[in-house]
């Protein structure tokens, strides 16, 4: 069966190369999808239909959730003016140019209102409530990502959402109790992307207890990441000695991470959370 699917995908490439990634995903067995998936950062201009996105969301809602409370919301943006604002909040990175941005929010407000209308006293504006909502939202986002990609769409998780959460909240009219935690850039891929490197399983999978790795073991676990060709290029382009320095000095330096952290903490308090 795999030979037949590969043949069909190859034939489709000859006839219509611009749609190859979509047909590849749609004809890829589930087991192969997970090992071969890759993040998409370049999208075609046409947006997937609202109906398709709603259908995916309807399925993604079956993701696990804390106490079956579903403490999350998703805000879909396709309006050009609002997209411009959101893209600016995401520093206009390439993936943010997708035709659809879906802002995933930790949302305790909806459940709180139901409790209050039902003569119950909610207590979710605390760290535990926030964590429950963040976990619920993350699980929904992951489920949505998988279903969307298996439908032939491409996605990219924008981790910059919390950097400018106040601006994003204002653009989307988010009330207190609702916090944007991540954004899915979604659309039809321009091409089939290459995979990024990953740490070996032994780096993160532990039996019974957490091991204390030796210095040599740590360097061995990160060897593939250090030697990945695009990463070596990052090191050279940024004039650094190691890939780690690219992360600490360029991508996530203290000079920006501390102010953004303080900004997000202030936003959480403004949204009514007690930290």
Image: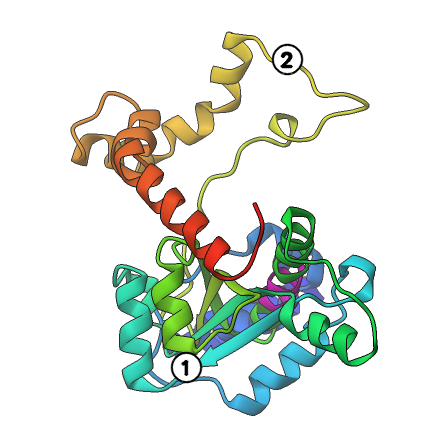
Relative to 110, 119 lies left or right: right
* First in residue order: circle 2 vs circle 1: 1
**Rendered position, 139 above or below 185:** above
State which quarter of the image contains the C terminus.
top right
> Foreground residue, 129 or 139?
129
Mark 2 crowd level (few <14, some 14–19, many ≥20, 10 Å Cα): few
Please name the residue shown 71% across and 76% down the image.
59
> Foreground residue, 149 or 123?
123
Please name the residue shown 77% across and 58% down the image.
66
Query: Which mark, by number, is residue 234?
Result: none
**Magenta region, mostly helix, strand or loop?**
helix
Which element type, helix, strand or loop, lies under badge 2? loop
Residue 266 position in % (x across, y down): 42, 51
Residue 267 position in % (x across, y down): 43, 56
Contact? badges 2 and 1 (CB < 8 Å)? no
Relative to 39, 114 lies left or right: right
| Residue 29 position by quadrant | bottom right
Foreground disc of the pair 2, 1: 2
Please name the residue shown 56% across and 68% down the image.
149
**Rendered position, 149 above or below 200:** below
Gap in angstroms between the C-alphas marked 2 and 1: 53 Å
Q: Is residue 244 magenta?
A: no
State which quarter of the image contains the N terminus.
bottom right
Disc 1 designates what residue?
Answer: 15
Disc 2 designates what residue?
Answer: 212
Which element type, helix, strand or loop, lies under badge 1? helix
Q: The magenta stretch spans which residues? A: 139-146
Residue 167 position in % (x across, y down): 34, 66
Residue 158 position in % (x across, y down): 42, 58
């Amino acid at each position: 069966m795999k030979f037949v699917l590969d043949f069909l995908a190859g034939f489709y490439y000859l006839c219509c190369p611009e749609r190859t990634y979509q047909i590849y995903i749609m004809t890829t067995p589930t087991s192969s999808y997970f090992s071969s998936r890759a993040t998409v950062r370049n999208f075609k201009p046409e947006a997937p239909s609202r109906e398709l996105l709603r259908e995916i969301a309807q399925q993604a809602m079956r993701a696990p959730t804390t106490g079956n409370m579903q403490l999350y919301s998703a805000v879909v943006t396709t309006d050009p003016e609002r997209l411009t604002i959101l893209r600016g909040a995401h520093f206009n990175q390439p993936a943010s140019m997708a035709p659809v941005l879906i802002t995933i929010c930790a949302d305790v407000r909806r459940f709180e209102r139901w409790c209050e209308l039902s003569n119950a006293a909610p207590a979710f504006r605390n760290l535990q409530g926030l964590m429950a909502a963040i976990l619920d939202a993350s699980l929904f986002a992951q489920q949505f990502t998988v279903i969307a990609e298996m439908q032939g769409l491409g996605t990219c998780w924008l981790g910059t959402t919390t950097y400018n959460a106040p601006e994003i909240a204002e653009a989307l009219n988010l009330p207190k109790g609702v916090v944007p935690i991540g954004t899915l850039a979604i659309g039809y891929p321009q091409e089939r992307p290459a995979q990024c490197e990953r740490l070996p399983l032994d780096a993160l999978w532990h039996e019974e207890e957490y091991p204390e790795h030796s210095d040599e073991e740590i360097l061995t676990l990160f060897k593939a990441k250090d030697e990945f060709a695009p990463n070596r290029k990052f090191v050279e382009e940024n004039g650094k000695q190691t890939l780690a320095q690219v992360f600490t000095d360029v991508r996530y330096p203290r000079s920006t991470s501390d102010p953004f952290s303080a900004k997000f903490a202030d936003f959480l308090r403004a949204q009514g959370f007690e930290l």
